[in-house]
Image: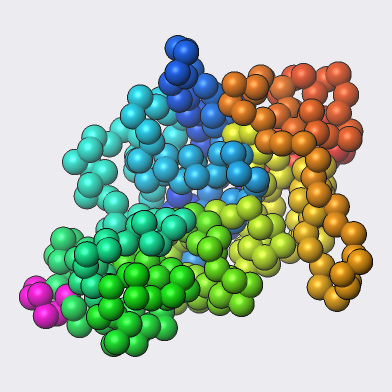
Amino acid sequence: MRTIPMETPRASVAPLLEVRDLHVRLPAREGGWLHALRGLDLTVARGESLALIGESGSGKTLTALAVMGLLPDGAQAAGRIALDGRDLLRLDEDGWCGLRGRRVAMVFQEPLTALNPLQRVLAQVAEPIRIHRLAAERGDARERAMALLARVGLDERQARAYPHQLSGGQRQRALIAMALAAEPELLIADEPTTALDARLRVQTLELLRDLVAERGMGLLLISHDLALTARRADRIAILYGGRVMEHGVAAEVLAHPRHPYTQALWAARPRLGGGRDQPLHPLKGNVPALTQLDEGCPFAPRCPLATARCAEPPPFDGRVACWEVKP
């Protein structure tokens, strides 16, 4: 069943990123195909941040790789991924090379592996500026790179260091600066706070929010942390089993989560001030492997509301994909 396209609060303005009915299949080792993304609909407007949230294995990173044109070899993608109205699925590799970095860029999950250990940070941030010819001279590129590193909170000594000489938070800021170097219109941040402590997680997300406001770009923010991330996004989409389970304005979803999966994620969050004896409410069960997915609701095996009709693809009313939740 094809889902109804999501509505955005900025419906009068054409979205910067538009993903419609996106299906991604991956080749299985034993032959055949694994249906990983199943009719995904997303939009991101300029100056807006959309948080894509779900447990590991829900399809978040695969969505980001599809938007970047970096799907694994042999993967098949169908549907529509449009940037400013341009259908990206029709691009060849030369077209993608002209797009990546310049119009859409990505902050990868682990900065220590994403950064080149043999190059100083300043040189790595200056490189995309030179490649995309945003500076006439090498010195101009370094000057622009230094200004960008300063904006994300790194000083000259840190800019001239090698990645291993920086802390985890400093490396993450360097990676953000490198992604922003060519002034992209869309930034994808894939779990940018995973390796950071609680204080640095908040600082990193607030930095991304401020940069979106300053530059008027769109942000697709990927995370498994509903409580931390959703408070710093305009809208959120809850992903599970390659499908959007719930979508809406972040404040409204947090105040009134409707899908059983969203409710379970919210209930599982740690709470401040509850003391050591405060009980946690972990979500029982595991995200299904791709080999276990069928055409029904992927959350049904873990859902307290599941009924026989959950064996069919759930209807999506623009907010929730569930047979048992009333519109």
The quadrant the C terminus occupies is top right
User: Residue 198 versus residue 38: which sits nearer the camera?
Assistant: 198
Query: Left or right: where does residue 3 sit relative to residue 20?
Result: right
Residue 313 location, quadrant:
top right
Residue 55 spot, x, y in % from top left:
65, 45
- Stretch of the chain drawn in magenta: 136-141
The number of discs equals 0
Residue 318, can we see it? yes
* Relative height, residue 33 to residue 84 (above, below): above
Query: Left or right: where does residue 12 sit relative to residue 149?
Result: right
- Indicate yes or no whether the magenta region holds residue 267: no
Query: Left or right: where does residue 30 sit relative to residue 287?
Result: left
Q: Residue at position x 85%, y 57% from top? A: 280
Residue 128 location, quadrant:
bottom left
Q: Residue at position x 16%, y 61% from top? A: 131
Q: Residue at position x 55%, y 68% from top? A: 196
